[in-house]
Image (tube, grey):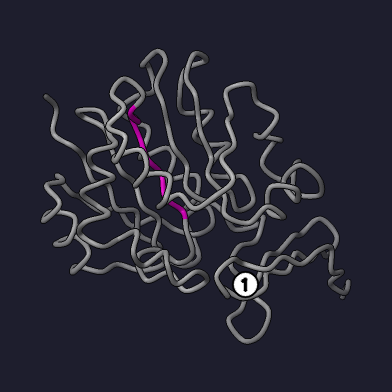
Amino acid sequence: MIPWTLLGTAEIPNNGGQLKLTQRGNEYSIHLAGVRGELMNNRVHSSELALSELGCAHIKNKESARVLVGGLGMGFTLSAALQSVTRSSTVIVAELVPEVIEWNRGALGDCAGQPLKDKRTRIHLGDVALLLTAKQAKQNRGDDYDAILLDIDNGPEGFTHTDNNNLYSLSSLKAIRGALNPGGVLAIWSAWADPKFITQLKKASFQVESKTVRAHKGKGSRHTIYLAKKAAA
């Protein structure tokens, strides 16, 4: 058995814990130090691809679409978003931990096909929740998003950064809805299904459905993609 090699560590802001990037042969893993275990692995990413494919399905032919990806991870969600939109579109990826961005520029880059090098990619270093809240406060029309894809922690019950739970509060969901263009879609990855969260999305005036997807090419763990649509004008 090839041993794991530690490639890097990173502190999550606001006492969120420590991330570790490890490698074993062609396999990469990002996990939390301690007992909480693996967050992502480059061999298991089918549900991350599904997040982008489902969340961007309505804009695959739209020129100059704007997509926001919350959470860079290993780059698979970003890569799939870029493949799901037109060449004139822009995909902004918001990542809280600067080391994660550097890992994707380095050792992890080839895993998802170097999406950070795509000319349509824009990087925002910071909390996606604060980005969306500030966006709504400024009320800038004309640069709203056609899709917002959130792949943060384990979903609405995020544990690596406790403030992420605030992202799924009713007030935050309403702010996200305000940052979407009419007909825009908020897609959220979750490690499990939660009927209460569907109710929360509906309270924020979204049209909601959920999809069950597998972690790895039709097998493995079952994950949930919440699709929350803002009504067309």
The question of residue 147 being in magenta is answered with yes
Rendered residue at 70%/29% (across/down) = 117
Give the residue at the far front of this rendering: 138
Secondary element type, mark 1: strand
Q: Is residue 87 visible?
A: yes
Q: Position of residue 226 (x, y in %)?
A: 29, 53
Q: Residue at x 25, y 52 (%)?
A: 173
Q: Quadrant of residue 19?
A: bottom right
* Horizontal arrangement in the rendering, residue 92 relative to residue 67 (left or right): right
Residue 26 in the image: state x and y as whole percent.
81, 55
> Horizontal placement of 125 versus 85: left or right?
right
Give the camera-side residue of 64 and 49. 64
For the N terminus, which image quadrant? bottom right
| Magenta residues (range) | 144-151
Instruction: Give above or below for 71 relative to 165.
Output: above
Nearer to the camera, 107 or 124: 124
Q: Is residue 107 left or right of residue 75?
A: right
Residue 161 in percent (x, y) is at 50, 69
Say which residue appears at 21% left-offset and 29% top-offset. Answer: 183
According to the image, label 1 marks what residue? Answer: 38
Q: Which amino acid type is marked by label 1?
A: Glu
- Snapshot quadrant of residue 182: top left
Residue 229 placed where, x, y %? 21, 40
If the image is split into quadrants, where does the C terminus sit?
top left
**Dot 1 surroundings within 10 Å: few (below 14), some, or many (20 or more)?**
some
Question: Is 123 left, or right, of 109 in this rendering?
Answer: left
